[in-house]
Image: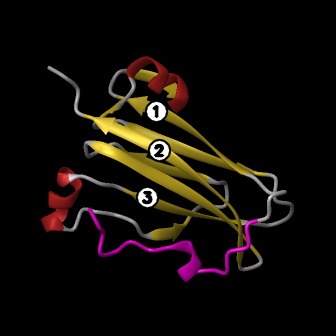
Amino acid sequence: FPSPDEEFIEDHFPVRINPAYQVNISSTVHGNGFRPTELSGFLSKFSWIPKHLSLTFQAATNVPGNVEYWWKVRNFGTEALSANGNNGLRGEIRQGMGDGKKHESTLYNGVHYIECYIVKEGICVAKKLQLVPIKKAEA
């Protein structure tokens, strides 16, 4: 499911991953009668995230000083493909808020991912990918 709008971090910034730097992504699932739950705990119970819930991603890094958080949301599957007049596949890279948070909704079946990039002084120095499996609830 190629996305015509997919972007790659090396097209935005030089990439020099520093092994001393890390970025971690914590994720919270909430909405639709569920108590806010860490994504890892939610997946250990259910294996998939139901459609029409909300996710809050929080990036944390050990990179010293001022950094920018950049995010890529990449979705796959026929539901995403057919959404928005066959333009529902995503893959754009966008700058996030300075607090490292990113809010998303679970809309389409499939295994998708979100990736966070840490940019310091115009160079991507750390990145992390988080899988996001979404499935329509069984009747």
Estimate the x, y position of residue 100 in percent, counting from the top left.
64, 54
SS category of the residue bearing label 1: strand
For image coordinates 51% across by 25% down, the residue present is 37
- Give the foreground label among 2 and 3: 2
To which residue does mark 1 refer? 29
| Position of residue 53 measured from the top left corner of the image (x, y, whole percent) | 35, 35
Which one is earlier in the sequence, the residue at label 2 or at label 1?
1
Residue 131 image point, x, y percent: 47, 44
The residue wearing badge 3 is 73
What is the quadrant of residue 139 in the picture?
top left
For the residues labelled 2 and 1, say whether their Cβ atoms are less than 8 Å apart.
no
Secondary element at tag 3: strand
What residue is drawn where x is 35% and y is 21%? 33
Dot placed on the residue nearer the N-terminal end, 2 or 3: 3
- Per the image, the residue denoted by label 2 is 131
43 left or right of 83 in image:
right
Magenta residues, as a range? 1-17
- Mark 2 or mark 1, which is nearer to you? 2
Instruction: Specify the amino acid type for callout 2.
Output: Leu
Residue type at tag 3: Val
Name the front one of labels 1 and 3.
3
Q: Is 133 left or right of 84, judged from the image as shown?
A: right
90, above or below 111, in the image: below
Q: Nearer the viewer, residue 25 or 8?
A: 8
